[in-house]
Amino acid sequence: AIAAEILREQHTPGEDWLLAIGRYHRPAGGAPAARYRRSVHRHLSRVLDPGVPVPTLQATTP
């Protein structure tokens, strides 16, 4: 529950949740946050049902 609240705090309305996930993992951003976002994206692509859309990776690296 605490992790979910922290993740919600990192999310900006209208923004991709993967960006919030990167900030949750690495608030300073940069390459470590981008690597983590890619890792989460790959994992979601594997575990979600084929009909469930996976968020796209945005080119920005906040």
Image: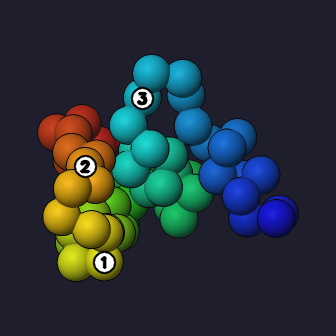
Quarter of the image where one finds residue 8: top right
Identify residue for label 1.
47
5 with respect to 33 (left or right): right
Inspect this view and state whether residue 6 appears.
yes
Establish if 33 lies above or below 29: below
Identify residue for label 3.
15
| Residue type marked 1 | Val
Q: Position of residue 18 (x, y in %)?
A: 38, 50
Q: Position of residue 48 (x, y in %)?
A: 31, 69
Does label 3 or label 2 sit earlier along the sequence? 3
User: Do labels 1 and 3 touch, CB within 8 Å?
Assistant: no
Does label 1 or label 3 sit earlier along the sequence? 3
User: Do labels 1 and 2 touch, CB within 8 Å?
Assistant: no
Q: Nearer the viewer, residue 50 or 12?
A: 50
Q: Assign the N terminus to one quadrant of the image.
A: bottom right
| Residue type marked 2 | Pro
Residue pictured at 18% horizontal, 64% vertical: 50
Does label 1 or label 2 sit earlier along the sequence? 1
Q: Nearer the viewer, residue 27 or 1?
A: 1
33 with respect to 51 (left or right): right
Mark 2 falls on what kind of element?
Answer: loop
| Residue type marked 3 | Glu
> Could you say which disc has been placed on residue 53 in the image?
2
Distance, label 3 to label 2, CA atoms, is 15 Å
